[in-house]
Amino acid sequence: MERVDAKTTGAVPVRRRSNALLDFLSGFQSIFAGMAVTFRNLVGREKITVQYPYERLPVSPRYRGLFYLPFDDEADRLKCVGCTLCAQACPTNVITMTKLGAGKHAGVSEFNMDLGRCMFCNLCIEACPFEAIYMGPAFELASFDRNASVFRIQDLAQGGAWAVEHNRRTIEAALAEEAARKSGRPEAGHAIEKVEK
Amino acid sequence: MQITTTEISSPGMTVNMGPQHPSTHGVLRLVVQLDGEVVVNCRPMIGYLHRGLEKMMEARRYVQNVPFTDRLDYLSSLNCNLAISQAIERIGGLEVPERAQYIRVLLCELNRLASHLVFLGTFATDVGATTVFLYAFRERELILDLLEAMTGARLTYNWIRPGGVAADLPEGFADRTRAFLKTFLPALNDNDRLLTRNRVFRARCEGIGVIPREMAIAYGASGPVARGSGLDFDIRKREPYDVYDRLEFDVPVFPEGDCMARYRVRIEEMRQSVRIIEQCLRDMPDGEVSTKLPKIFKPPAGEAYSRTESPRGELSFFMVSDGGQNPLRVHVRAPSFVHLSLLPELLKGVKVADVIAILGSLDTVLGEVDR
Amino acid sequence: MSVATTPMGVSKAYKAGQLLAGLAIVAIILILSIVVAHLPWGWAQPIVSFIGERPLLNAFVKAFIVANFVAVHVLFLIWWERKFAGWLQARLGPMHTGWKGLAQTVADAVKLLLKEDIVPAKADYPLFALAPYLAFIPTLMTFMVLPFSLTWVGCDYPLGALYALAVSTIAALGILAAGWGGNNKYALLGGMRAVAQLISYEIPMVVVVLTVVCMVNTMSLTQIVTRQEGLWNIVRYPILIPAFLIYLVCSMAEVNRAPFDLPEAESELVSGFHTEYSGMRFAFFFLAEFANNFFTAGFAVILFFGGWLGPVLPGPVWFTLKALIYITIMMWIRWTLPRLRIDQMMGFCWKLLVPASLAVLCVAALWAVSLP
C-alpha cells in the first residue's frame, strides 16, 4: 500500500519507457501468466453450474421466501390472532386481513398478502408477537397470471384449505362456548364439536 | 502514445449511450458528442431509476424506512442500512451494544467484498476480459451464501437496524466465514494475476481517465475514486463509527488518479476487508445484538447527519425529525451521484473506447444516483 | 492452486466418468475414421473419374463438398467455442439442447431463420443485402485451395498461398458494406474500424507467409505440406517460431477475436458493423467469422505444422485435429485477455508487427540463401 503525501499533483503518470524490449517481454510474460490462470481453471476446477431446474441448491434455514401461517396442532387452529401488527409494520401495505371473533379466541377468516407489493423485508415476521407468520424456503413464485401475486389464506396457511377450515371451526366453537358461558345458560346437549383429524 | 487525428471536416456525431446499454452499469444515459473517435462533450442524464425514495420515507415510520435503503445502493445494501440506522440512532439517542457493532462491521465488510467483486467483474467485462466476470461472481456467490445463512436474503438484506442488528449470527457462521476467507485470498490473487499486470489491461487502464487531486477535492469525490487520486480519505479512519477504531487495517491510496489506480485501490481494499473480517470474528464479544426500540418510536425533534464509508464512497444520510413517528425529511448523499458529476469534465478529449472504461472505474450504482 | 469448491460436490467418480466418456467418444471417432479410410473405396473410382473428366461438374461438386464441410464444421466450432469458454470460466456451457448441448447451434440457426428480416428504412439496400455475401463468399473461396490431404483438395492451385491471402482480404469489403448499408452511425464506426484493422494486419501476415514460402520455395499449399515430410516446418526452420507467433497474432486480428474484437465488441459504444442485421443475414456474418477461423487455422497448420502429415490417422483427420488445436489456443487467448483499443491495436501492428515480420523475413531470406 502506498501512502501518498500532500505533494502529489496527480499528473499523468510517466510511461515505462526505460527499455522497450524488456517492456515487450514482460508484456508477453504477463499474458502467459494470465493464460496459466485460465488453464488452471480449465482443468483444475470443478464446474460450478447448477443445472436448474434439474438440480437445485438448498436454501439456508433463515431464507426469506414465501410466507406461511403456522398451524397449531394442539389447539387445532392457526396461531394467528388477527392483531394486525404485521400489517401495520409492513412498509408497503402488503397484508390485509379479516378478523374472526375478538378477545381470547380471536383469529382470522381472511388473510391476504399482495406479494406484488412485498419487499420480503422480514419486518412483518419480526413484528408478530405470536410467531404466527414465517417466511419459508419457497422462492419459485413466478406466474403467468398477474393475479397470482395475491396470496389468500388458504395459499399461506400451513395445511392449506383444510387448516383454514379447522381454524374457522375451532374459533367459532370457542367463541360460541364463551358466549354461552357469558350469557349464563348452559347449552343443553350442545357439546363442543370435536372434529376428528 | 499520442495520436494526432487530422481534422476531417465532418460535423460532430451525437451518439446516445442510451439507458439500456450493456456497460452503463444501470440505467444511465450518456449523450456524447463525438468528433471522430474523440469525445467533445458528454451529458449524463439520470432519473431513469427515480422512485421517490426520499419522499416515501417521509410517509413511513423510521424502522419501516430501513428496507428502502436496501434499494439505494443495492450492491452494498448493508452499508446503506447502516447509514440510515446511524442517522436514526443519532436522532433518537440510541446506544448500540458492542456485539452488535462487531456484527455490523462484519456484515458491512462482507458486503464490501461482494460489491467490489461486482466491480471487478463488470470492469473487466467493460475492457473485454469476460472470464474474470465469472470468477468474480463465483466468489461473490459464496459471500451471498454466507449472508443468506445470516439474514435470509441475498441482495436486499434489511438486517442492520437502528439499535443494532435484526438477529444474531447463526450456528457455525464463524467457521463458514473463516473457511470462505481461506479460499478467497488465493482466488483474488488469481484474478490479480489475470488482470493487474496484464499488458493489455494496463494499456487500457493506465493513464486513462486521470482525475487530478484538485479535481477530486473540488468535485467532492470520495471512496476509491478519491483514494485513487491520492487523497488519503477514509471515513472509517477519519470519523470511525462502530468498532473501526479498534480494528487494524490499512487504507490503500494510489496517486496516479487513472482507472488503474482506482482498480488497484478496490483490489487492495478487498484484502483489507478480509483482515477486518478475521479480526471481527476473533474479537467479537458476547452480548445483546440490539437495543430494544420502544413500540412507538418517536425520537426528539432535531437533525442528524451520519457519514459512512460505503464501497462507492461517502454515503451519508441527513435526517430531520419533528418529534413524530415519521421523519420529516430524509436526504441521501449518494457517492455515485457526486462521481457522475465528474463525468463531463473527465470525458473531454477521451476516446470512445475509454468512455466505458472510465465509467466502469467510477463504479456507479444508479439506484443511489436516482433514488 | 486456487481451486474453489462447489456446494453441489459431484463425486470424483462421476467426474472421472464424464472425462472418460468424452475421451472415449473422441477415440471412437478417430478409430472410426481410420476404419473408414481403409475400407475398399475402389467401387467409387468410376464415379470419381466421371466427375474428374468434366471440369465444370468437377468444380461444382468440389465446391459443394467444401461448402457443406464449412457449414457442418461451423456448427461444431460454435458449439466447441461455447463449451470451451464455459469450461475456462468454471461453468458448463450449453447442456440442455441435445446431448451435452451439441444441438445448440442447430437451435440457434433455426431461431435465426425464423426471425423477421428487418431492413432499416433508409438503408442502402443493395449494399445492405450484398454485404453478408461479400463477407462470406471469399472465405468459402479460400477453402477451395485448402488441402485436407494430398488428394482431398478443392483445387491444387500452384499459387495457392497467394490466392488464399488475396481472396480472404475481399471480406473486408463486405464488412465495410455492412457498416455503410445499415444507415447507422454505430455500424459505420464499427465497419471502418474493422476494415482498418483487417487491412493493417494483413501486412505482417503476408510477410510471414512470404517467409515460409521463402524457406520452402513453393507457393502451392500441397507442395508446402509434402515438403514437410519427416519434420514440420516450424521444427526444421527455427526462424519460423517468431514467424508463427506473428502469424498467430495476425490471425486473431483477422478473425476479429479478442484482444482485437473492438469492431464487434458488445460492451463498447458501438455494437459493431453488424448492428443492423438480424436473422439469417446476421447468421451469415457469424458463419463467415467462424469459417474464417478455421481457414486461418488450417493455413497455419499447413504452413508450420505439417498439414495432414501424421502417423496412423488418415490425413484429413490429422489436419482437422491440428486446426482444432490451433483454434482452441486462439479461444484460450481470447477468453483470457481484455481487448485493445483501436489506436493501440493499430500501433501494435504498425510499430511492432510490421518491423518484426520484416526482420523475420530478412533473417529467413539470408538463411535460405545460405543453405546449400
Image: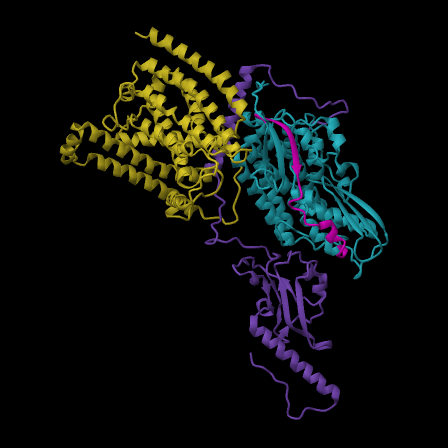
Chain colours: A purple, B cyan, C yellow
Residue farthest along the front direction in this orientation: C122
Residue B77, image x, y percentages = 67, 47
Q: Where is residue B303 in the image (x, y as percent from the top left)?
A: 84, 48
| Vertical position of residue A118 compared to residue C237: above or below | below
Query: In the image, A55: left or right of C162?
Result: right
Quarter of the image where one finds residue B349: top right
Instruction: Please state which of residues C244 and C155 is positioned toward the viewer in this rendering.
Output: C155
Is B349 in front, or is C348?
B349
Nearer to me, B104 or B48 = B48
Rendered-image quadrant of the N terminus of chain A: top right
Q: Quadrant of residue B273?
A: top right
Which residue is pictured at 74% across the width and 32% down the height? B219
Which residue appears farthest toward the right when viewing the image? Answer: B301
Number of marks present in the image shown: 0
- Is residue B46 part of the magenta span, yes or no? yes
**Residue interval drawn in magenta:** B35-62
Q: Residue at x 64, y 92 (%)?
A: A189
Q: Is residue A146 in view? A: yes
| Figure check: C242 above or below B254 | above
Residue at the spot 58% in from the left edge and 46% down from the top edge: B142
Residue B147: percent from left, percent from top: 63, 49
Q: Is residue B252 left or right of residue C234?
A: right
B191 vs C292, left or right, is right
| Residue B43 is inside the magenta segment | yes
Residue A50, x across and y down, in percent: 49, 49
Residue C304 visible in the current orientation: no
Instruction: State the quadrant of the C terminus of chain A.
Output: bottom right
